[in-house]
Amino acid sequence: MTETSDIDARVREIVAKYAKVGAKDLNRETDLQALNIESLDLIEIIFEVEDAFEIDIEQDEKAADLTNLGEVLDWLTANIESQKAA
């Protein structure tokens, strides 16, 4: 099973690429709007996470309400872990 810290690190790398900042500059409270990450960027991030972890993420209503990196990490981690367990 993938460790949560591994998921966090990889997702931070992916988000940092789209935000054009260093992964070390990101924390759980980092606001997505402050990073200029828009909904299209979030979709691209999700696609890249799917590729990185070899899963399919169901995009639900909650995805549209994510406002900070911590929420994104929690949502993606839950998706990754549920699919890896299946």
Image: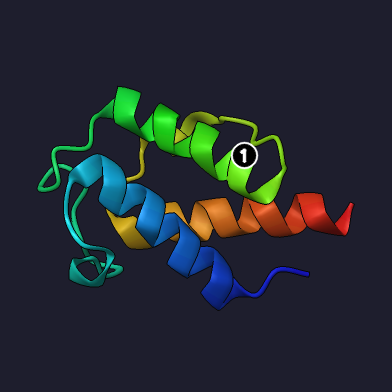
Report the residue at 53% width, 76% height from top.
Answer: 5
Report the residue at 18% width, 53% height from top.
Answer: 31
Tell me the quarter of the picture where residue 84 sits: bottom right
14 w.r.t. 48: above or below: below
56 w.r.t. 34: above or below: above
Tell me the quarter of the picture where residue 13 sits: bottom left
Picture coordinates of residue 46 (x, y %)? 49, 37
Picture coordinates of residue 83 (x, y %)? 78, 49
State which quarter of the image contains the N terminus.
bottom right
Picture coordinates of residue 32 (x, y %)? 22, 46
User: Can residue 4 be seen from the camera position used here?
Assistant: yes
Q: Secondary structure at mark 1?
A: helix
How crowded pointer 1 is (Cα within 10 Å; few <14, some 14-19, many 20+) is rated as few
Report the residue at 18% width, 68% height from top.
Answer: 25
Q: Residue furthest right?
A: 86
52 left or right, relative to 41: right
Q: Which residue is mark 1?
A: 51
Give the camera-side residue of 54 and 84: 54
